[in-house]
Amino acid sequence: MLIYIIGFTRAGKSRLAQELSAQWQIPAFDTDDIFCQQQHTSIDRYVETYGWAAFRELESRILLGIPELLGDSQHYPYPDAIVACGGGIVELVQNREFLKTQRLIWLHPPWSLLQKRNQINPSALTRGKTEEELFRIYQRRVPLFRECLSFTGNC
């Protein structure tokens, strides 16, 4: 069984994945880390060169390919695993449709905490943006995260 963790940038997805991995003795994966390993560059540099649309397309391929990457359900090398998703993974419709069929944890801390964390440690998305710009992105994404909770898969 895979459990996917979604949430806005700096919500704590990667940290929670690592903590659950240690407690439950199962592997943890991070879509941002997989991206950087596959592309041999940082998200910042990739976006500077190719733009957000190109990044989102590759990010989507990673998300949709994780079950194959880990193996099919009959010969699953990781019977249980945690996957921390990038903060913008919900931007593409196909990702939201996929996530609706998966077991999810949505980390949804208050905006004030996200804002503080993003000021301390800006991401590729947050770097150079005003608080108002970031809040608009946050407001746009919250319904997208919520949409993913419409579980349509089999239990």
Image (cartoon, helix red, strand yellow):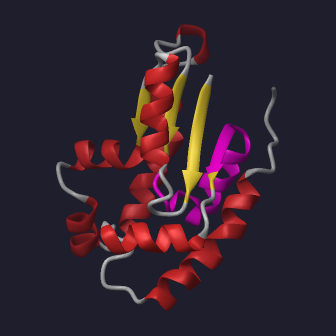
Q: Check if residue 149 falls in the magenta segment.
A: no
Residue at 50% x, 68% y: name it.
114
Q: Nearer the viewer, residue 73 or 33?
A: 33
In the rendered image, residue 108, in percent from the top left (x then y), is placed at 63, 58
Q: Which residues are magenta?
A: 86-106
Left/right of residue 47 with respect to residue 71 in the rendered view:
left
Q: Nearer the viewer, residue 124 or 122?
A: 122
Residue at 52% x, 19% y: name it.
24
In the rendered image, residue 39, in percent from the top left (x then y), is placed at 23, 50
Q: Vertical placement of 136 versus 13: above or below?
A: below
Residue projecting furthest to the top? 75
Residue at 31% x, 66% y: name it.
121
Q: Vertical placement of 72 versus 131: above or below?
A: above
Residue at 43% x, 23% y: name it.
22
Q: Is residue 93 something one can see in this rendering?
A: yes
How many numbered marks have been drawn onto this rendered protein structure?
0
Left/right of residue 38 with respect to residue 133 in the rendered view:
left
